[in-house]
Image (tube, rainbow, N blue to C red):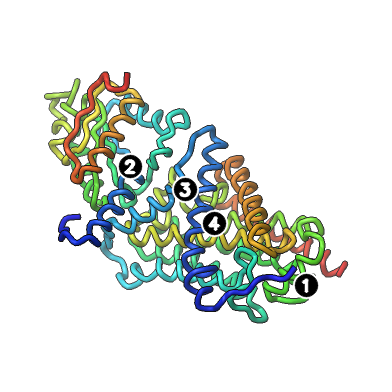
């Protein structure tokens, strides 16, 4: 997708690739120092009640298999290197979703001596999902926003508002 | 009750060999995932999900990790898929006559089906990743445990037929009562052996996500992962065909093929949702203490009553 001469063949290929990318987002989940509240909500999102598999989302164990890094919490000094390493291990094209107030701004931990800052200071973030913790509906809404922005080409930075799921 | 025949070139590229097999594999993966989802009270994936996964993986970047043998890393997924596709030539896919057939092709097919597992083990051992190494060890351990009982279970029908040719066994099965009824123990061992071969739960210790990340495939991304997945889907398709042809009264036409293989697939998904994962030592114990013994008893009975 980086170089696309405007041949019809290339356009068809791009369309097929984009279709597959939108319909099969495999996720990996990383906690870079959150209080576990957001992680519980993410796991709740993956349970049969909300069933993200109907959008094609599958939780993967290995970063090599994943397309979307779902990251929670502020980034502590210790986990900064790990977060970077996991991000580097993912094959392109890859996207990052920051879940929870701490991931957006540092939240309650902002300014602590052991905090680097929010997630976007370490890796580029595509979607921010606020909330402390965000409800599963909000997380699903954020994922759908990311997939919608993929349709337009490069993912725009999108913010999901708190009342969006209501 | 005669089988239909097709032109060899079409057989290789289109009908039982190439595109049909890939499409069938993807379709059966979707049915498998959808049924498991419904048993878990979920909606489950959409019908094109396996295809979208495949195209996405093929379009993704492939990372070659440090410390691997590059040629081996590149070629192993190709060999795995190729061997799975080749084995389809000897099997009565969709009730048609196998594209190629000779005396003893049963053994060749079984070995071709094992090559995929062997490639998986080698792929895991090739990378420096510790999770991949443990996964590879478990994959090969499981290969040694289920392979013998599975082979013995498929030998039962072969001995009754007095032929090692899949086509002949298929004809024989069509003309006699279902061997699932005359040889029930062999049928159960073959069915459970197929689950072990495909690393479906409860035999998914080699790729246990909660313990060893993704097993032997941990370091694979993009193309390699896609080809391994596809190879496994094709093997599911062929394995179901073989067990149905041997034990469920043969495959004479496409309709019969669909009904029998889908029926087997439903049984497999029920077993998948019912049981929790076995530890690798429990898997080995189950196969050698129960599986192999049961298959041997079945063989002895077949010999005595023949």
Pointers 2 and 1 within a single chain: no
Residues at badges 1 and 3 in contact (C-beta under 8 Å)?
Answer: no
- State left or right for residue A12 relative to residue A46: left
Tell me the chain of label 1: B
As drawn, the label of residue B194 is none
The crowding category of the residue bearing disc 1, from other C-alpha atoms within 10 Å (few below 14, some 14 to 19, many at least 20), is some
Q: Secondary structure at mark 1?
A: helix
- State left or right for residue B56 relative to residue A109: right
Q: Residue at x 51, y 58 (%)?
A: B25
Q: Which residue is mark 4?
A: B198
Pointers 4 and 1 within a single chain: yes
Residue B279 % position (x, y) = 55, 48
Residue B184, located in which quarter of the rendered image?
bottom right
Tell me the chain of label 4: B
Vertical placement of B164 versus A63: above or below?
A: below
First reached walking from the N terminus: tag 1 or tag 3: 1
Q: Residue at x 64, y 81 (%)?
A: B102
Q: Which residue is mark 2?
A: A28
User: What count of labels does the image hold?
Assistant: 4
Residue A44 % position (x, y) = 40, 28
Q: CA distance from mark 1 to mark 3?
A: 39 Å
Residues at badges 3 and 4 in contact (C-beta under 8 Å)?
Answer: no
Question: In the image as oriented, which residue stretches furthest toward the front?
Answer: A8
Q: Which residue is mark 3?
A: B208
Dot in front, 3 or 2: 2
Vertical placement of B190 versus B37: above or below?
A: below
Q: Which residue is mark 1?
A: B161
The crowding category of the residue bearing disc 4, from other C-alpha atoms within 10 Å (few below 14, some 14 to 19, many at least 20), is some
Residue B168 % position (x, y) = 72, 74
Q: Secondary structure at mark 3?
A: loop
């Amino acid at each position: 997708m980086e170089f696309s001469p405007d041949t019809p063949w290339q356009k068809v290929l791009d369309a097929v690739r984009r279709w597959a990318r939108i319909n099969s987002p495999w996720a990996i989940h990383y906690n870079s120092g959150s209080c576990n509240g957001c992680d519980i909500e993410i796991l709740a999102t993956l349970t049969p009640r909300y069933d993200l598999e109907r959008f094609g989302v599958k939780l993967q164990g290995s970063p090599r298999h994943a397309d979307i890094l779902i990251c929670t919490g502020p980034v502590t000094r210790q986990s900064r290197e790990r977060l970077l390493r996991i991000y580097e291990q993912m094959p392109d094209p890859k996207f990052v979703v920051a879940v929870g107030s701490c991931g957006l701004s540092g939240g309650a931990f902002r300014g602590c001596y052991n905090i680097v800052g929010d997630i976007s200071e370490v890796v580029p973030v595509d979607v921010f999902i606020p909330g402390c913790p965000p409800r599963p509906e909000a997380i699903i809404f954020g994922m759908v926003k990311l997939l919608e922005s993929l349709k337009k080409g490069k993912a725009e930075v999108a913010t999901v508002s708190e009342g969006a799921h209501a | 009750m005669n089988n239909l025949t097709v032109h060899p070139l079409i057989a290789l590229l289109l009908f039982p060999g190439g595109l049909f097999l890939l499409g069938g594999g993807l379709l059966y993966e979707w049915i498998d995932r959808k049924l498991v989802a419904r048993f878990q009270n979920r909606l489950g994936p959409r019908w094109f999900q396996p295809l979208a996964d495949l195209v996405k993986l093929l379009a993704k970047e492939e990372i070659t990790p440090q410390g691997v043998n590059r040629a081996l890393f590149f070629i192993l997924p190709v060999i795995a898929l190729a061997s799975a596709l080749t084995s389809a030539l000897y099997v009565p896919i969709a009730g048609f006559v196998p594209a190629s057939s000779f005396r003893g092709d049963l053994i060749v097919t079984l070995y071709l089906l094992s090559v995929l597992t062997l490639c998986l083990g080698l792929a895991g051992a090739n990378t420096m990743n510790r999770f991949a190494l443990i996964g590879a060890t478990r994959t090969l351990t499981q290969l040694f445990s289920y392979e013998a009982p599975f082979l013995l279970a498929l030998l039962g029908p072969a001995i009754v037929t007095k032929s090692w040719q899949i086509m002949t066994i298929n004809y024989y099965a069509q003309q006699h009562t279902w061997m699932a009824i005359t040889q029930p123990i062999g049928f159960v061992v073959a069915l459970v052996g197929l689950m072990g071969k495909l690393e479906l739960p409860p035999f998914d210790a080699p790729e246990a996500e909660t313990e060893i990340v993704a097993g032997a495939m941990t370091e694979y991304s993009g193309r390699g992962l896609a080809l391994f997945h596809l190879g496994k889907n094709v093997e599911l398709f062929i394995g179901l065909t073989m067990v149905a042809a041997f034990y469920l009264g043969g495959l004479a036409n496409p309709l019969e093929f669909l009904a029998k293989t889908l029926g087997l697939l439903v049984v497999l998904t029920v077993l998948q949702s019912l049981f929790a994962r076995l530890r690798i030592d429990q898997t080995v114990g189950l196969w050698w203490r129960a599986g192999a013994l049961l298959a041997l008893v079945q063989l002895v009975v077949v010999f005595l009553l023949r």
